[in-house]
Image: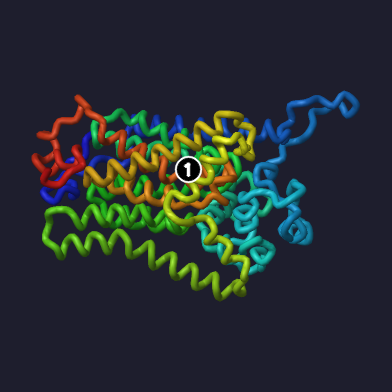
Amino acid sequence: MNVRLGRGGYHSRVPAPLFERRTAAVAAAGFALGCVFLLLQLVRLDAVPLRWNAEARQPQPRLDVTAPFEVGTGWRLDEALIARGIPARITPGHGYDGQWFLGLAYDPLLRDRLAGSFDMPRYRAGRPLQAMAGWLLAAGRTPAIPAALLLVGPLALALGAAASGRLLAAFGRSPWWGLGFALVPGVAVGVIFGTAEPLGLALAVLGLSLTIDGRLPAAAAAFAGAGLTKESYLVFAGAAALWLLWSRRPIRRRLAGAALLLGPGVAALGLWWAYVARMIPGSAADANAAEAVGPPLAGWAATLRLAARGGYVPDFPVGPFGLVLLAGSFALALAGVALGLRRRGPLDQTGLWLGLYGLVLSAALLGHFLSAMRALAPTVLATGLAVGAALPSRRFAPATVGGREAAEVEAGATGS
């Protein structure tokens, strides 16, 4: 399946079908991988009935789908859930970020003021789509919300793997390369802890695929969804818009296409943030969210020095493999920047901007392995897609996709 690009280098004369047999098979495999990740996490947390209680003559403990969210005692969410009669496994300490999505899923429109018990209320509530998806899957039924919210992860892996496979197939790869989406470390972390990375990145990749296919309104909707899942993912829309601006179409059409890709996401996020500001009083703690970024490479220099002295200890049982993943992510960030500076294809430019994003992460964030993998997930994914598209392929025939402009997309260059 090669995307047939028109004279502007992005308009599809013969749009490829969104789903076909191979794409559906990749989606099914991605969903299965997500279910395996979740099952392993539930076993690790002792939340599945695998042991037999001889005295009670029944397995124990029973399935506890709230365990992966790790609701902590460091804030007031545990007290808020108990006061509302909502059962959840409580973890001593601050817990982990999945708890905020769980809390939002019980109160997606912020009417019950549950977000007031979060560490950074406005910041957490500003990312609504993951929680809304869980609420919709549960049909608003409170007892079903934890399981439905966990199910969002495998479903997002299905979408992300299919979209990645479809995207890379346009550059001559097998759609099965799309399963690499499920193997991005930060995406896997998002699945097992119920956070937003799998859904947000799946929508971002879908937006890129639709952009190359020439379906700009649908791409804009996908990018808007990615931004509402995690605001930083609007960088994908920005990179796609820049690629359109560099195309060889009339300037008005380039500007219109770029505005179409970016406008809906910016508008939707702005409207939601205005709603959040109205529903949740301002909180000084929200300012701490800015600590995730710092001067370029400064955070990496401090973190890699710490690792070289043997002082870097991942906050997840991955052992030495954690350092391999961290160093590999850094290498991919550098590769994304280098590739994007040399080539101007859509995936190359995405790799460039997400690579730059990965290089400005702070030492405070990089020092926490799980959070670092999640923050680096868009960088790893974008660079992986760019490298996959740039590799030589015998299956890609420029003559079949519209002449010189199609070859530019394969090579990632404009006029070179």
For label 1, the crowd category at 10 Å Cα-Cα, with few meaning under 14, some 14 to 19 and many 20 or more, is: many
At which x and y percent is residue 252?
15, 65
Residue depicted at x 18% and y 60%: 254
Quadrant where the N terminus is found in the figure: top left
Quadrant of the rendered image containing residue 287: bottom right
The residue indicated by pointer 1 is: 156
Colouring: rainbow
Indicate the quadrant containing the C terminus: top left, top right, bottom left or bottom right. top left
The answer to whether residue 39 of the structure is visible from this angle is yes
Counting from the top left corner in percent of width and height, residue 296 is at: 42, 53
Q: Quadrant of residue 104?
A: bottom right
For image coordinates 61% across by 29% down, the residue present is 319
Q: Amino acid at mark 1?
A: Ala
- Nearer to the camera, 295 or 175: 295
Q: How many marks?
A: 1
Q: Residue at x 69, y 63 (%)?
A: 117
Q: Position of residue 15 (x, y in %)?
A: 22, 44
Q: Nearer the viewer, residue 108 or 197?
A: 197
Q: Nearer the viewer, residue 85 or 247?
A: 247
Mark yes or no: residue 145 visible. Answer: no
Under tag 1, what secondary structure?
Answer: helix
